[in-house]
Amino acid sequence: MGLGISSHECGKYKEAEDALRMANLYEPTNDTVWGFIALNCLKDGKRFRDANSALKEMNKIDVCLIFY
């Protein structure tokens, strides 16, 4: 996750997406990973549906944590 966030902050969006997707495989319930995936999709400027899907996943996790 750290590599994905760092890459995103440095403007290396392809590398960020690869690292974030890998982090998501290992930790699919991490809402921060989903949030940065959404941000990465929005930086592209064309992937609004992907960003929306990632945000929906992030919100599902947040709701589950509230009731846990």
Image: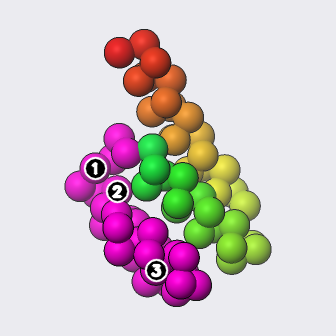
Q: Position of residue 64 (x, y in %)?
A: 43, 22
Labelled pair 1, 2 in contact (Cβ < 8 Å): yes
| SS state under label 3 | helix
In reply to whether residue 2 is colored magenta, the answer given is yes
Residue with the mark numbered 2:
24
Q: Earlier in the sequence, mark 3 or mark 1?
A: 3
Say above or below: 66 vs 32: above
Q: Amino acid at mark 3?
A: Ser
Residue with the mark numbered 3:
7
Labelled pair 3, 2 in contact (Cβ < 8 Å): no
Specify few, some or many for label 1: CA neighbours under 10 Å numbering under 14, 14-19, or 20 or more: few
Specify few, some or many for label 2: CA neighbours under 10 Å numbering under 14, 14-19, or 20 or more: some
Does the image show residue 50? no
| SS state under label 2 | helix
Residue with the mark numbered 1:
27
Q: Position of residue 24 (x, y in %)?
A: 34, 56
Identify which residue is drawn at 52% across, 76% down: 8
The majority secondary structure of the magenta stretch comes to helix
Q: Earlier in the sequence, mark 3 or mark 2?
A: 3
Q: Amino acid at mark 2?
A: Asn
Q: Which mark is residue 46?
A: none
Disc 3 or disc 1, which is closer to the eye?
3
Q: Amino acid at mark 1?
A: Glu
Measure how far apart labels 3 and 1 are at the Cα level: 18 Å
- Region rendered in magenta: 1-30
Disc 3 or disc 2, which is closer to the eye?
3
In the displayed orientation, state which residue is furthest to the left.
26
In reply to whether residue 15 is colored magenta, the answer given is yes
Q: Which image quadrant is residue 50 in?
A: bottom right
